[in-house]
Amino acid sequence: MREIIKSVRNYLNLTQEELAKDLSLTFATVNRWENGISFPNKLAQTKLYDYCTEKEVPVYRMVMDKIKNYTRKTKLSKNQQILYHGSKSGISGKIAPISRDKCDFGKGFYMGTTIEQPATLICDFEYSKIYILSVTLKNLKVLNLKDDIEWAMFIAYNRGRMDDIKNSKFYLNYKKITEKYDVIAGSIADDRIFYVLDNFFDGNITDLALTKSLSVLNLGKQYAALTQKACKNIKIEKEINLSFFEKKFIRQISKQNRDTGISLAKDIQKKYRRNGKFFDEILETRK
């Protein structure tokens, strides 16, 4: 957190003594924070959060920039790429395909191309961590899903939204896909699109409204390592602990993103309510 405190002070063009005065603290306290000698307690972090909010300091961007700076320092070998992972309590032991049930692309180890998505997922948990990973996809069977209705239907299968047609060829086809590949990659169903997807699955908007939403939102990409073979190709480059202070700003942005998704869904629902097919109509035609 010391980098963020220094970034806040530099953004406001304050000395350590001036920042300390604004926060009703001693110069020595701020100095120890920035030097990593001591760490602000939760009460001090809350005070700093309120101060930064009042001064409109872009702390969220600072946190993302801090992680991106760590990323730039990561040395990659040939065929490797950088991905990010968020864990509610930290990774213990070997990386394995053991996510919770009913994840978007099946049970696996999930990674994303953006920092923001895993950060928003774990911002409510005290001992959560962000990981910078190097990943080698060479020699793995990788399925890249396009941003279309098939992406949504694959998510529907994995979330249990197709259980009413379990014996159909359509359902079994998605099961075969999951068993065939080491890695599934496609757009992240983050807070901005999560509400839109649920509206589609619940029959409130059509497939056309959904695909229009996908084209408007600039979603990052997520990778689900479904096999142990794929997980062996993942290496932890850096583990990042986020402070209570930093998570409060991430939580704030997460809510804003969700509100954006809800607003978008409502607008698109009105515009395309008479065009396209509803989820239950698609299932009915593919039984």
Image: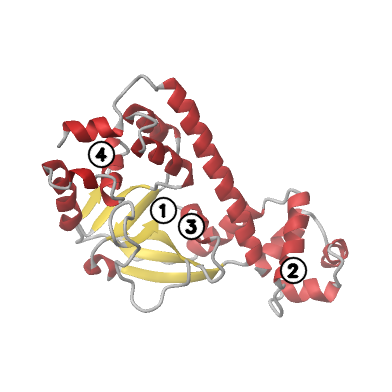
**Dot 1: few (<14), some (14–19), or many (≥20) neighbours within 10 Å?**
some
- Residue at figure coordinates x 38%, y 59% from the top left: 111
- Residue at figure coordinates x 52%, y 64% from the top left: 70
Which mark is first along the chain, 4 or 2?
2
Which label number is shown at residue 121?
3
Task: Look at the numbered disc 1 and give the secondary structure of its residue.
Answer: loop
Mark 3 near mark 1, Cβ–Cβ under 8 Å? no
Which mark is first along the chain, 1 or 4?
1
Q: Which residue is mark 4?
A: 150
Between the residue at mark 1 and the residue at mark 2, the CA separation in whole angstroms equals 34 Å
Q: Position of residue 127 (x, y in %)?
A: 54, 71
The type of residue carrying mark 1 is Thr
Which mark is first along the chain, 3 or 4?
3
Q: Nearer the viewer, mark 3 or mark 1?
A: 3
Task: Look at the numbered disc 2 and give the secondary structure of its residue.
Answer: helix
Q: Which residue is mark 2?
A: 43
